[in-house]
Amino acid sequence: MTYKIIDDFLPQEEFDRLEDDIMGYYFPWYYFDRESYEIETDTFQFQHLFYRGGEYPYKSEGYYDIVRPILHKLNVDEKKLHRIKAILTTKTPTHRFSGYHIDYPDMTTVVFYVNSNNGYTEFQKGGKIESVANRAAIFDSNMVHGGHTATDQKTRVLINFNYEI
């Protein structure tokens, strides 16, 4: 089981702009009645879909440019993108687990953490990645993983990228 962690992924000025946009009052978040497409639970999260490829392509009008610095640093060709979405979970009294899942088979997954908190990403076969602002975690999308909410901050915010290898 391997994953790569890159701290201070974006230059500070680029990260500050991204953080200001996503954590700002006017960024649109959309309610999603579960934390995983694969697992039906009584939990929820907020999402913002920046991009979806495939049969029904979508690009978030006016917001897609927010993630361009990350795509540029990853050196990802937009033709290989499958999905980019931001995820916001709210503070919980104890860590709440989203359940194990994979995003999509046979791709690369990148989790970019927007804010620091005590939530984390956990892998079924062992290992966890703490939520640290401006950190990118890169791993094979076939690695079964799940997220844990924060108990020390109002929100846990990250951006999830899925693209072809």
Image: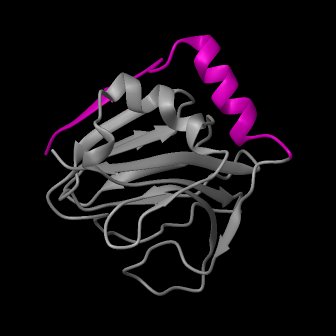
- Extent of the magenta region: 1-25
Q: Quadrant of residue 75?
A: top left
Residue 100 coordinates in the image, percent (x, y) = 33, 69
Residue in view at x 58 percent, y 43 percent: 118
In the rendered image, the quadrant that contains the C terminus is top left
Residue 146 coordinates in the image, percent (x, y) = 39, 61
In the rendered image, the quadrant that contains the N terminus is top left
Q: Confirm whether the magenta stretch covers residue 13.
A: yes
Q: Confirm whether the magenta stretch covers residue 15.
A: yes
Residue 5 coordinates in the image, percent (x, y) = 33, 29
Residue in view at x 33 percent, y 42 percent: 78
Q: Nearer the viewer, residue 49 or 33?
A: 49
Above or below 103: residue 7: above
Q: How is the image coloured?
A: one colour
Residue in view at x 60 percent, y 36 percent: 66
Residue 92 relative to residue 86: left or right: right
Residue in view at x 59 percent, y 12 percent: 12
Q: Is residue 59 visible?
A: yes
Residue 61 coordinates in the image, percent (x, y) = 63, 52
Q: Nearer the viewer, residue 41 or 95?
A: 41
Q: Is residue 127 visible?
A: no
Q: How many marks?
A: 0
Residue reaching furthest to the right: 25
Above or below 31: residue 76: above
